[in-house]
Amino acid sequence: MKALIKSLFLFTAFLSFEACAQPKKKQNSNDSNNINMTNTETITLGSGCFWCTEAIYQRLEGVVKVTSGYSGGHIENPTYEQVCDKTTGHAEVCQIVYDTTKISLDDILAVFWKTHDPTTPNQQGNDVGPQYRSAVFYHNDHQKQVAEKYIAELTAAKAWDKPIITEVTAFTKFYSAESYHQNYYNNNTYQGYCRYVIGPKLEKFEKVFKAKLKKE
């Protein structure tokens, strides 16, 4: 975890996504077919637009499945339009299934805090609204403890000038987003948001986490 804090200062400079990156080779969204599911664990994370979160975690070795959806609200089976109306209480999240023999919870959360700004309430870049809030929906006590420990240590290290406002809440329900949201970046690489926001973010992420990426 000390390595996370040390490298975080370097990575915070990467949170300005203005330049256009070259499109990346498409990657499979789910690799669950050949995985022993008894070794997997699930965590639900909100770090802004779920298109970005999905694209990042799809590229990590050990991540079995990433599903974009909604969590943390009070409306059952919400639609994207309802969530965008900012009245459902839901956040855009990704439900991440990972193989614990290949990637640790520490690594999953290191990526989480290094690839978004956890100090901006209800906002990531130009995406504004409660659905874009920073959130960890933990599925067990261990996930809660590790998330809270990260926050305490990052706060003590003054990794950001402003306080961390990441919501750490027990997971209740997850609603999968509409099919067109799934595997979004890989299916829409040349779309404007993908080229000018997700692409540059992925390029910077891949430089920092080169050793953690899936082999092509």
Image (spheres, helix red, strand yellow):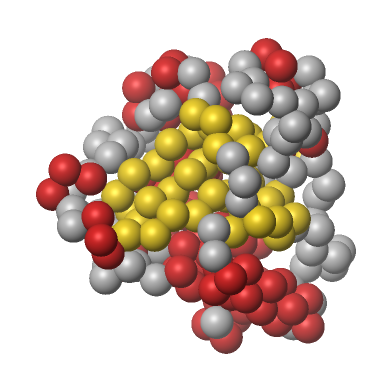
Seen in the image, is 46 located left or right of residue 28?
Answer: right
State which quarter of the image contains the N terminus. bottom right
Q: Position of residue 100 (x, y in %)?
A: 33, 67
Task: Note whether 97 is above or below 38 in the view shown.
Answer: above
Badge count: 0
The answer to whether residue 99 is left or right of residue 46 is left
Outermost residue, left side: 34
- Figure quadrant of residue 146: bottom right
Residue 112 visible to the viewer? yes
Q: Is residue 55 visible?
A: no
**At 74% from the left edge and 78% from the top edge, which residue is drawn?**
152
What residue lies at 27% left-to-right and 64% top-to-bottom? 39
- Above or below residue 46? Residue 128 is above
Instruction: Name the residue nearer the viewer: 163 or 41.
Output: 41
At horizontal 43% and vertical 36% (from top left) the residue drawn is: 67
Rendered residue at 78%/18% (across/down): 85
Q: Position of residue 44 (x, y in %)?
A: 54, 49
Spot occupied by residue 145 in the image (x, y as percentages of width and height): 62, 75
Q: Nearer the viewer, residue 59 or 150?
A: 150
**Which of the pair 155/101 is nearer the observer?**
101
